[in-house]
Image (cartoon, rainbow, N blue to C red):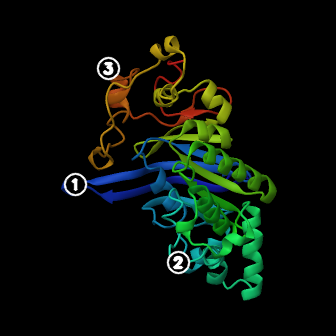
Amino acid sequence: MPEAALLSVKDLVKVFPSREGKELRAVDGVSIDVRRGSTFGLVGESGSGKSTLSRCILRLLRPDAGTVSFDGQDMASMSAARVRRLRSRIQVVFQDPHGSLNRSKTVSDIVGAPLAAHRSGNRAARSARVAELLDLVQLPAAMTARKPRELSGGQAQRVAIARALALNPDFVVLDEAVSALDVSVRAQILNLLRELQGELGLTYLFISHDLGVVRYISQDIAVMYRGRIIEVGPREQLFAAPQHPYTRLLLDAVPIADPSRQRTRMRLLGEQTGADDRPDLPDDAGCRFRSRCPVGADRERCATEDPRLEPHAEGGTLAACHYAGEIS
């Protein structure tokens, strides 16, 4: 485990049963390191395995192979009792701000639930902590008596963030935490997350399909496709000189106002199939992106040899592509 990493995932695999008795490798040999005090962005299309990876990290799902080390402790092999004791240091904020909150409870009950579950302080101490947390996420104290139906989307997500911070965690998983919000509210929540990170020394795993959002908040970024990391590197290096065709295609999919530049952008050759329909490719079956790739679709090596995640550029970028950098 790298010295600066708070979280280290190595060769993680999660398999689900699929149609016709086949196995679906939702996460297929993923390795990432999340530096302490930083934000690690994870980006990819729906069905790429991002949320499954996060649930394995959180031990909401038990991985079938590989390790998840948090501050030197292997979570993948922990008992349920040990995982529960570690919960206070690892929290999550989900995509749907209203769906993740108990509609029958007040804001005070919701934010204070982790404190009650971990028997932290007496009732008066918990009430004081709830007021402190609401102030931290910039909500008025009068909000404590409201229920989720009385909150806007931004307010509800601030409540979810306050709940996640109740036990002073070190690490927070943000799973599409701003994708359901309006653009202006999204910016406010992103700025709040950055302020909280600076003030509390938090480490984030930020999952999103929005490259602009990931670029704004992350220092390191991994691109995921069909269960695997296909490119990973520092933010500026990855955006300035993407090495994998898929990363370049994701960047080219972001709308721009220049028609001449829009016409020169790369295009996919095909469409991704649904997650349940994708084949379970063995190591010698070639690149899993080749059917959509404008660079390697007709190349023999791409059809027969599965590319490994390897260094392909200065600055620390790794890419799983036989012809990495050719698109530049």
Which residue shows up at 75% across the image and 76% down it? 129
Position of residue 3 relative to residue 165, above or below, is: above
On the picture, is 278 further left or further right than 96?
left
**Given the image, on which type of amino acid does mark 1 rest?**
Arg
Q: Which residue is mark 2?
A: 80
Q: N-terminal of the two: label 1 or label 3? A: 1
**Quick one: label 3, few (<14), some, or many (20+) residues within 10 Å?**
few
Indicate the secondary structure of the residue bearing disc 3. Answer: loop
**Relative image position of residue 94 (x, y in whole percent):** 53, 59
Figure quadrant of residue 151: bottom right
Identified by mark 2, the residue type is Ala
State the CA–CA distance, disc 1 to disc 3. Answer: 29 Å
Disc number at residue 298?
3
Q: Amino acid at mark 3?
A: Asp
Callout 2 crowding tier (Cα within 10 Å): few <14, some 14–19, many ≥20: few
| Callout 1–callout 3 Cβ contact below 8 Å | no
Residue at the farthest top position: 260
Q: Position of residue 48 (x, y in %)?
A: 42, 45
Which is nearer the N-term, disc 1 or disc 2? Answer: 1
**Vertically, is 110 above or below 274?**
below
